[in-house]
Image (tube, rainbow, N blue to C red):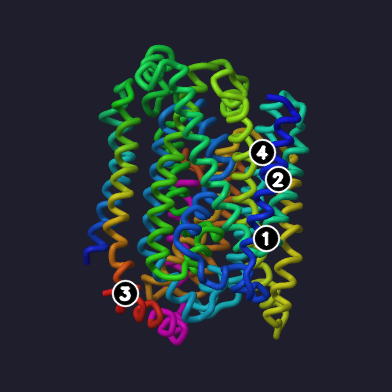
Amino acid sequence: MARDKWMGAVGVVVVLCYLVPYTLLSNVVAWYGSFLFWSGAGVVVIALNIFMTRPFKEHDRD
Amino acid sequence: MTESMIWMAIAIYLSVSVMIAFLSRQKGVESMSGFFLGNRQMNGFVSALSYSATTYSAFMMVGLAGLTYAGGVGALGFEIIYFAGVSLVAIFGPRFWAVGRAFGFVTPSEMLGFRYHSKAVALSMSIASCIFLIPYCAVQLAGVGYLLEGMTNGAISFTSGVLLATAIAILFAYVAGIRSVMWTDSLQALVMIVASTLVALLVIQALGGFGELFDTLAREHPDALTVPGSGLFSLTTFLGLSIPWFFFSLSNPQVSQRLFMPASLSAMRQMLIGFMVFGFVYTLVSILWGFSALTAFPGLERADLATPTLLGSDFIPPLLGVIVMVGILAAAVSTIDSIMLTLASMLSRDVYAHVKSDVSEKRQLLVGKFVVPVIALLALGFAELQLDLIAVLSVAASSGLVAVVPAIIGAFFWQRGTAFGALLSILGTSAFVLTMYATGNALWGLPAGIWGIAVATLLFIGGSLLTTPHAPSRVAFLDAVNDVLAKRR
């Protein structure tokens, strides 16, 4: 189901939020390191939630 | 900024808020769902702002900025993982909403009590929530205390600040229950998002711009831009902080109760997305405050002073500093009044009405209203203990509240879940987390925040497999959910 797919994507984002800053970015001393990565993750989460809750609108129109 | 200016700002904030609280009154608050749920008719916009105000408290502007000051960018990661956890609302929101309407649930604990056909489950969740959330309220009050004391150089004492916030929270909760709380929350959230963003922009500009701020950090505090950085955000600590917060939207009844309130699923969607946009901006602003304070005032005695120092500095016009400071006071109030109402509704609905038989709706409401100030006074007592580093204590509450998460997930997604499993999980995990905190918060090197969810899940599954589920309540409960979801497809 579509909603599960979006939720799975949120799960992937969360795992990356732990993995990437503690490995790949642990030596990047700049704004484009962990700061940018986690900020980007926040934007992605918002987008995923917009997609995930689209059916809520249809519910009320029935 | 003078003391009289601060008192003047507080007076203006109070007058406007009280006016809004009274305007929010509506007929029909003399029932439990009227007083505590706004008759399940809240619109999306107010719900979004109020959800934000309830979640983001003094912790955010004082605690998160302080955590950034002390430990660097890891504070952002921690908050973003919490943020991703709010996506659980997209899964559980419509389900809570559906059963709330079908069975008239007022509290999440009442919902669990019905699903597992057990008064003891409802009762234990209510009591566990009180044990962990009253200290959490205290953390918010202490935030206000630090802030007012820090910004006025002690002219307004810690105790005066704490007393003031408690009195305002009781007032807002009494005028029209959740409606007055949500409307005053909305005012606070709107003022705060504008004012705090303005502060961040002004400070960053004064420090030479965004690029210069980060260049200075890279030069003088390189640890602040990476994890584990200076060591505060070791992976273990980071996991211990962020895992409980990931489940915040389910584990904390003052926000999960909100899932019963929207007038429609569209309103719930607006609440969720609105909250996320608001929360994202607010998070970045708080982190930038912490970074700015670290650049401009690197030698502060305590990290919690980062925000007060910044607001009292020459970077900020005094008027804006005062507005934000009163905004932070209001943020603490908006969190505390919601928690007080939720705990009061749980204590009257799930404790009092279960212990005494045949309690009328009117009587429950009366008891609920009586409990509100009692909770406030308990929180006041804890706040006076003046514990250090606000964020860490607040996370202790979150670790404990995780106890209810498996029982909530199981209610909707695991037919085999039983009352015994739920009870064992809630009581066992609460006792486990309390013991962990009492004995230094480390078991085989890992904190309660990491253990909590694992212990709760094991106890829930183990206890459920040993006993038989109550089929009729499960069937009725899941049928109500399926009716709504089927309509959605």
Query: Relative to the observer, which residue lies in front, B1 or B232?
Result: B1
Q: Amino acid at mark 2?
A: Ala
Q: Amino acid at mark 4?
A: Val
Residue B468 located within the stretch drawn in magenta: yes
Q: What residue sits right under mark 1 in the picture? A: B22
Q: Earlier in the sequence, mark 1 or mark 4?
A: 1
Q: Quadrant of residue B357?
A: bottom right
Name which residue lies at 53% across and 57% down. B252
Query: Relative to the observer, which residue lies in front, B203 or B402?
Result: B203
Q: For mark 1, does the 10 Å Cα neighbourhood hold few (<14), some (14 to 19), or many (20 or more) residues?
A: some
Q: Earlier in the sequence, mark 1 or mark 2?
A: 1
Q: Amino acid at mark 3?
A: Arg
Q: Which mark is residue B165?
A: 2
Circle 3/circle 4 CB separation < 8 Å: no
Nearest to viewer (mark 1 / mark 2): 1
Name which residue lies at 60% across and 59% down. B129
Horizontal arrangement in the rendering, residue B150 relative to residue B458 (left or right):
right
Circle 3/circle 1 CB separation < 8 Å: no
Q: Main secondary structure of the magenta part?
A: helix
Q: For mark 4, does the 10 Å Cα neighbourhood hold few (<14), some (14 to 19), or many (20 or more) residues?
A: many
Q: What residue sits right under mark 4 in the picture? A: B144
Circle 1/circle 2 CB separation < 8 Å: no
Q: CA distance from mark 3 to mark 1?
A: 33 Å
In the rendered view, tell whether residue B222 sits above or below residue B339: above
